[in-house]
């Protein structure tokens, strides 16, 4: 079964590359200068012009891939194919819609494929946010709660299989204000568990179906790399038993609040606050956690509990042509209830990263984060927040 999954992912990675690369290699000769003739030359020209193309109603795809390394995944190859388009190209104030196809495979049994994006309707009257992600890899679980998570003796190896679909459909109620229904479906399985003790008797596999709504107040100047503006999101989801949650009955509330402020030439100060609270019998894989994209200095998923909060401030500075850097610092906490938050249990983090603009308002980022007795390395598309 593992070999079948791996072959399936290899095929998907190849398919993800074929179409955009063939489009790049087959551009009309009269649109390419003489010195760029040949496939290699055309590809170089393609990437050189990738952040200068005008938006059309058809997605303009740009492939990007490269090796990466982390202690969790080993040596890997990641591929991202990012596309942007406009539902009304003549409206220069309309935010661009975007879509990304992702694939990753690494030596320690890690592989993932996914697609996500935002579709913005003409006049910014409606928005659709969507994401479909599949991942399977060998990882670690420390249990639930700070006492378990902070003790490295509880570190247990297992194989994670996860398939998650999320989506929402929002209507504009007022300038910048959107509201609409939201759904999240996921199947999660933990296999080949070295020691089941940290699960404390919980089911190792489950299916969850969540429905609810999303309220968004968005004044960002663009969706993928904001230079100014504010974003506030409130996501409320419910997962009652009667819609397919056989052994669980729970709910969650999530808040995101971001502020983007231009400083001096080429500098942006981005501030971020995020909290998620769960109620009821929440399965272990749906509990809020820190690490990875949220708190880049920690192992993804190590710290998890009924509730989690984190905040960060990041300075993003353009350096030269399409290159830039980012430095950040932040703090986070997991807790069962608000009264459990303690100063000695706060988790600080800081880090530095490199940015390369491979499309207009779309960056590739390479980040190195440091936390309390831990560190993390990330390669990704667009900013962490």
Image (spheres, rainbow, N blue to C red):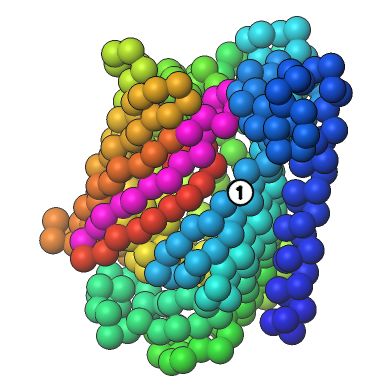
Magenta segment includes 81? no
Please identify the residue farthest to the front as the structure is shown: 35
Span shown in magenta: 356-372
Rendered residue at 66%/8% (across/down): 92
Figure disc tally: 1
Query: Which corner quadrant holds the N terminus?
Result: bottom right
Q: Is residue 206 left or right of residue 55?
A: left
In the rendered image, residue 54, in percent from the top left (x then y), is placed at: 71, 16
The residue where tag 1 is placed is: 65
Q: Does any portion of residue 232 appear in the rendered image?
A: no
Q: Residue at x 25, y 42 (%)?
A: 329
Residue nearer the viewer, 170 or 249: 170
Q: Is residue 37 above or below residue 182?
A: above
> Residue 267 appears in which quarter of the rendering?
top left
Relative vertical location of residue 241 with respect to residue 180 in this rendering, above or below: below
Q: Is residue 56 visible?
A: yes
For the residue labelled by badge 1, is the local secondary structure a helix, a strand or a loop?
Answer: strand
For this rendering, which residue is in front, 214 or 132? 132
Dominant secondary structure, magenta = strand
Give the position of the C terminus as an image quadrant: top left
Between 83 and 219, the residue placed more toward the observer is: 83
Taking the magenta stretch, the answer to whether it contains residue 362 is yes
- Above or below for 314 versus 279: above
Q: Residue 141: x percent and y percent?
A: 42, 77
Residue 261 position by quadrant: top left
Residue ID at (59%, 38%): 214
Q: Position of residue 79 (x, y in %)?
A: 63, 51
In the image, residue 205 lies at what x, y percent? 61, 79
């Amino acid at each position: 079964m593992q070999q079948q999954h791996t072959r399936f992912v290899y095929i998907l990675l190849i398919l993800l590359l074929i179409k955009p690369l063939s489009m790049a290699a087959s551009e009309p000769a009269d649109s390419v200068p003489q010195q760029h003739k040949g496939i290699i030359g055309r590809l170089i020209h393609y990437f050189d012009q990738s952040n200068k193309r005008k938006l059309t109603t058809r997605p303009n795809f740009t492939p990007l891939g490269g090796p990466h390394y982390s202690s969790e995944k080993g040596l890997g190859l990641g591929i991202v194919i990012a596309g942007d388009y406009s539902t009304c190209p003549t409206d220069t104030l309309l935010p661009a819609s975007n879509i990304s196809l992702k694939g990753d495979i690494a030596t320690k049994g890690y592989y993932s494929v996914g697609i996500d994006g935002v579709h913005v309707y003409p006049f910014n009257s409606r928005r659709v946010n969507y994401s479909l992600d599949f991942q399977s890899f060998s990882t670690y679980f420390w249990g639930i709660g700070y006492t378990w998570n902070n003790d490295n003796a509880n570190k247990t190896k297992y194989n994670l299989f996860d398939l998650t679909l999320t989506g929402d459909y929002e209507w504009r109620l007022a300038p910048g204000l959107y509201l609409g229904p939201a759904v999240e479906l996921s199947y999660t399985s933990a296999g080949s568990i070295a020691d089941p003790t940290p699960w404390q008797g919980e089911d190792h596999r489950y299916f969850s179906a969540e429905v609810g709504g999303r309220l968004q107040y968005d004044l960002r100047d663009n969706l993928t790399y904001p230079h100014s503006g504010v974003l506030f999101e409130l996501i409320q989801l419910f997962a009652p038993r009667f819609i397919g949650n056989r052994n669980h009955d729970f709910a969650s509330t999530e808040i995101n609040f971001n502020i983007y402020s231009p400083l001096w030439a080429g500098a942006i100060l981005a501030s971020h606050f995020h909290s998620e609270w769960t109620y009821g019998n929440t399965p272990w894989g749906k509990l809020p956690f820190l690490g990875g994209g949220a708190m880049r200095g920690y192992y993804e998923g190590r710290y998890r509990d009924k509730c989690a909060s984190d905040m960060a401030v990041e300075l993003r500075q353009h350096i030269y042509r399409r290159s830039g850097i980012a430095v950040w610092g932040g703090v986070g906490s997991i807790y069962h209830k608000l009264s459990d938050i303690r100063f000695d249990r706060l988790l600080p983090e800081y880090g530095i990263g490199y940015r390369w603009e491979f499309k207009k308002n779309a960056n590739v980022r390479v980040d190195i984060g440091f936390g309390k007795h831990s560190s993390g390395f990330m390669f990704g598309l667009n900013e962490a927040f």
